């Protein structure tokens, strides 16, 4: 992709305004020259080291010259006006050597480039230069540039601070009044965190007009009862919106007591937020009108936009810098009492509270709003994303992280625009508050046709689960389960582990709870002798102290409270589940067994949940005397699932953030050359031949069993003689372009001894695969060991997904796989190895010694690195991978490349 091929993108400055970042075109010459000519004399001197009147023209000439290798120029544009320029040139590009933030790339080193930056006067300190440099860094990396150099005057504090704050490794060398800066472009977590921090601040600032508007206008509110626009206006007015509210309708001067005006331009104040409830065909024109008037955010509830209308709506938002929610959405709400914004057409107003909610489905949104209000958790802010043209779940996570009101985040997302950026945000946010989601789209209907074992195993469910697991997101299977889990996480502390004690006044209810806990993966430890004696001392005669603890129907309120309190204080128990049924005994004595729990503090030493089989609602929060609440469930399974989610969250939080290990003997440059050469010869892509595949694996130090390539019968005999091990046996595998699943096609001969068997095997392949066979792979017969499977598939949305599990010919039948998104951290690799059902075999179960676990980790890490380095890598399939106590080696490998260039997932840009 050349510089001119890069499509324009829009991104946010630190104050939340939108700019367009694009390549320079010849027609930009006049504006670029004007950019320099309008600079103050001091800024011109800092930029060019001189105030020559020719400097501006020469700089514009250079930027607008025809595209040439080694040179890139990007500009920032706002409302059609150029406000900044950043360029780099390698040694074979064009260099002007004219001062501020420029330098010389010497010799033939095209991995180093000089950089220059210019920002319009009056627009400094808004992040224009930093944003341009981030985009220039991304473009340079894609072209193989590894280092930027720049010269600046030592008094040019702004540009020196810009470089220092990028998050990249920067060195300075002072030479008199000048400073030479060297900036290493290697992408690491420090840089990504710096980019993320800048993006978070810009994103939150851009949402202020949407979620904290001072003025709102509803466009499309009519006089007819029952219209969506009128319902929105009524909700805003009746909900007590504390700021200025207007309607736009040319036929009336007032609607529902709200002043109405004929057009947006006729409003007495420019709205921060315009709410559009108009026919689809009118949306683009009204959006354009809003943008010209200076509106800063749009909420479009209209559905049914066609492609042209959608393009017109988003185009207006980008041109005029308006953030957009929708179209086809329920609305937005911010329950802050100082604002009381409810721009939705839900049946009622959400209860103020602490849960942030973002959904794509309006129906799901209504269910969550109702459920959270009923539980008493309430809502801090709500956004119905609808078709999600702009504002996304990632934006909302950043808002909730910084709004000072939200302590619980609930998401229902049907799609992901940038899963890797979302994952980084979620990993950070979920350490501050629980982030819950419904794992929608789990069925095989979304599974794409696949050829290799890797692609067949990489289902949409597995990909999404990998994202959620690595990001620490609590993924539930239904809206009901989401609410049940939210109730527990809101009301109770996290458990220290998965050991649950069950207390009941009816044995049958206790059995149901025990089954539910076991099915949820929780542990029911037997009580210690000390705890048993302790509980028998307070429970009525006939009580059975096991797990469950059957307190019998005779237990009264005081004894039940003391029993639960003693269990929660025991160090061997992490959570208590109390199953209660109404009995005539309690009714006769006036005991309220629920009050045994709510009469004390809601939060004890460990979480407590209640199961009441007669409860009408699936989940309730029981108010305690101290103002806290205890979750109560109608079904034991619901309580157990909620506890299991809490256990998983606690475990995720207790583990420090993983790191991506450094790997030795990696030759990324050579690997890229291998990929580029293959695609040059095969423009449509395809499966690598054995020799190219082995060369690519060697670039990443992935161990392969010795092998040789043979195209004739005699070559196969010679290779077999060289490769025979102590037992004298070899294996021969047929090859032709695109061959997959060799075992299924009987394209493998095993246990060959002597030249005669090798010749016979080769002739068999020649006969059966006549017209296809291009050669054979000869290998020694591998030693005995555990056959595993490792692979990667490049998902166009989620990026590379690494899979691992039991290998061999039955890998798809057994489906014993785990998956994580690349790049893998040390924690991810550990989870990959320990998650499949076959994991005990790797650790020495059934009397065998453990396999080379370090070697296995290295194979997975190197596979992850290869997939992360090469966006052209569509699939890699290692099956089998032989694991023994002494080594891990790949016996068979297939790699498919496609001509693609993946966008930088961490580059700041709007959707």
Image (cartoon, rainbow, N blue to C red):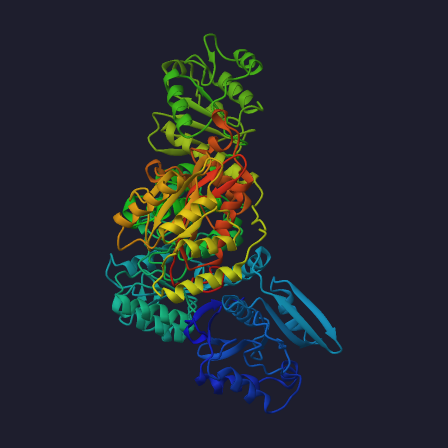
* Foreground residue among 191 and 314: 191
Tell which residue pokes out farthest to the right in this image. 176
Image quarter of the N terminus: bottom left
* Foreground residue among 174 and 857: 857
Q: Is residue 656 left or right of residue 903?
A: right
Q: Quadrant of residue 2?
A: bottom left
Image quarter of the C terminus: bottom left
Query: Horizontal and vertical percent for residue 499?
Result: 50, 26
Q: Say above or below: 441 vs 525.
A: below
Query: Horizontal and vertical percent for residue 608?
Result: 49, 28
* Foreground residue among 569 and 50: 50
Q: Is residue 570 left or right of residue 502?
A: right
Query: Horizontal and vertical percent for residue 732?
Result: 38, 44
Q: Say above or below: 395 vs 119.
A: above
Tell which residue pokes out farthest to the bottom in this image. 53
Q: Can the viewer see residue 286? A: yes
Q: Say above or below: 608 vs 269.
A: above
* Foreground residue among 273 and 304: 304
Q: Is residue 758 left or right of residue 399?
A: left
Q: Can the viewer see residue 473? A: no
**What residue sits 50% from the left and 21% below the top?**
525
Query: Horizontal and vertical percent for residue 135?
Result: 51, 68
Tell which residue pokes out farthest to the top in this image. 541
């Amino acid at each position: 992709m050349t510089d001119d091929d890069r499509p324009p993108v829009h991104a946010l400055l630190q104050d939340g305004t939108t700019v367009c970042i694009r390549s320079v075109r010849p027609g930009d010459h006049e504006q670029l020259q004007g950019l320099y000519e309008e600079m103050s004399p001091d800024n011109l001197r800092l930029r060019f080291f001189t105030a020559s009147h020719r400097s501006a023209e020469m700089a514009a000439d250079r930027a607008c010259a025809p595209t040439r290798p080694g040179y890139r120029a990007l500009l920032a544009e706002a409302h059609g006006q150029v406000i900044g320029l950043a360029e780099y040139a390698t040694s074979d590009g064009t260099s002007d050597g004219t001062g501020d933030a420029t330098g010389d790339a010497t010799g033939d080193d095209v991995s180093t480039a000089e950089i220059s930056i210019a920002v319009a006067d009056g627009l400094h300190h808004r992040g224009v230069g930093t944003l341009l440099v981030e985009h220039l860094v991304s473009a340079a990396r894609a072209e193989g540039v590894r280092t930027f150099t720049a010269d600046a005057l030592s008094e040019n504090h702004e540009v020196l601070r810009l470089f220092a704050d990028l998050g990249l490794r920067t060195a300075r060398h002072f030479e008199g009044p000048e400073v030479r800066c060297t900036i290493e472009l290697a992408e690491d977590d420090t840089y990504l965190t710096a980019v993320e921090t800048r993006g978070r601040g810009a994103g939150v600032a851009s949402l202020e007009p949407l979620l904290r508007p001072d003025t709102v206008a509803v466009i499309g509110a009519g006089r007819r009862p029952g219209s969506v626009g009128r319902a929105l206006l009524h909700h805003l007015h009746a909900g007590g919106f504390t700021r200025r509210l207007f309607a736009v309708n040319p036929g009336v001067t007032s609607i529902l007591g709200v002043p109405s005006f004929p057009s947006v331009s006729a409003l007495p104040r420019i709205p921060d937020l315009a709410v559009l409830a108009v026919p689809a065909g009118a949306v683009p024109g009204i959006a354009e009108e809003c943008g010209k008037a200076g509106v800063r955010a749009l909420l479009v509830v209209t559905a049914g936009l066609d492609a042209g209308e959608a393009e017109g709506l988003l185009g207006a938002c980008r041109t005029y810098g308006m953030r957009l929610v929708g179209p086809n959405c329920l609305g937005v709400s911010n329950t802050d009492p100082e604002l009381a914004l409810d721009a939705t057409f839900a049946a009622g107003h959400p209860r103020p509270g602490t849960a942030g909610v973002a959904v794509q489905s309006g129906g799901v949104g209504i269910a969550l709003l109702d459920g959270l209000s009923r539980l008493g958790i309430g809502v801090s802010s709500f956004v119905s994303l609808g078709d999600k043209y702009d504002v996304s779940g990632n934006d909302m996570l950043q808002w909730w992280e910084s709004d000072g009101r939200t302590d619980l985040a609930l998401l229902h997302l049907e799609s992901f625009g940038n899963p890797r950026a979302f994952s980084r945000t979620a990993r950070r946010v979920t350490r501050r508050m629980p982030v819950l989601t419904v794992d929608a789209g789990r069925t095989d209907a979304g599974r794409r046709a696949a050829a290799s074992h890797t692609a067949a195993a990489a289902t949409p469910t597995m990909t999404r689960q990998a994202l959620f697991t690595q990001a620490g997101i609590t993924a539930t299977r239904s809206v009901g389960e989401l609410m049940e889990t939210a109730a527990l996480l809101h009301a109770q502390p996290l458990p220290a582990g998965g050991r649950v004690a069950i207390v009941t006044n009816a044995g049958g209810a206790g059995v149901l709870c025990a089954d539910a806990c076991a099915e949820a993966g929780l542990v029911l430890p037997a009580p210690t002798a000390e705890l048993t004696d302790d509980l028998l001392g307070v429970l009525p005669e006939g009580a059975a102290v096991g797990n469950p603890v059957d307190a019998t129907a005779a237990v009264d309120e005081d004894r039940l409270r003391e029993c639960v309190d003693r269990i929660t204080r025991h160090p061997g128990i992490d959570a208590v589940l109390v199953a209660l049924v109404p009995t005539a005994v309690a009714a006769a004595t006036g005991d309220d067994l629920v009050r045994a729990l709510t009469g004390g503090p809601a939060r004890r030493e460990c979480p407590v949940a209640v199961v009441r089989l007669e409860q009408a609602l699936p989940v309730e929060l029981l108010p305690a005397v101290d103002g806290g609440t205890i979750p109560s469930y109608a079904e034991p399974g619901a309580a157990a699932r909620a506890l299991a989610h809490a256990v998983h969250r606690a475990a995720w939080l207790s583990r420090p953030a993983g790191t991506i290990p450094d790997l030795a003997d990696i030759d990324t440059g050579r690997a890229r050359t291998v990929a580029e050469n293959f695609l040059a010869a095969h423009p449509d892509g395809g499966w690598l031949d054995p020799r190219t595949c082995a060369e690519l694996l060697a670039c990443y130090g992935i161990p392969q069993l010795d092998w040789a390539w043979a195209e004739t019968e005699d070559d196969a005999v010679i290779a077999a003689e060289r490769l025979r091990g102590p037992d004298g046996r070899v294996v021969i595998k047929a090859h032709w372009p695109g061959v997959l699943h060799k075992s299924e096609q009987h394209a493998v001969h095993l246990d060959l001894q002597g030249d005669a068997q090798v010749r016979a095997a080769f002739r068999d392949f020649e006969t059966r695969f006549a017209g296809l066979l291009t050669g054979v792979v000869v290998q020694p017969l591998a030693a005995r060991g555990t056959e595993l499977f490792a692979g990667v598939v490049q998902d166009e949305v989620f990026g590379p997904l690494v899979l691992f599990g039991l290998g061999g010919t039955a890998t798809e039948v057994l489906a014993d796989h785990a998956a994580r998104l690349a790049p893998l951290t040390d924690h991810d690799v550990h989870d990959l190895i320990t998650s499949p059902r076959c994991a005990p075999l790797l650790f020495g179960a059934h009397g065998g010694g453990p396999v080379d676990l370090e070697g296995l980790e290295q194979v997975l890490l190197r596979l992850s690195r290869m997939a992360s380095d090469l966006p052209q890598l569509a699939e890699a399939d290692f099956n089998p991978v032989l694991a023994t106590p002494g080594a891990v080696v790949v016996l068979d490998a297939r790699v498919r490349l496609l001509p693609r260039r993946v966008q930088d997932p961490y580059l700041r840009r709007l959707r």
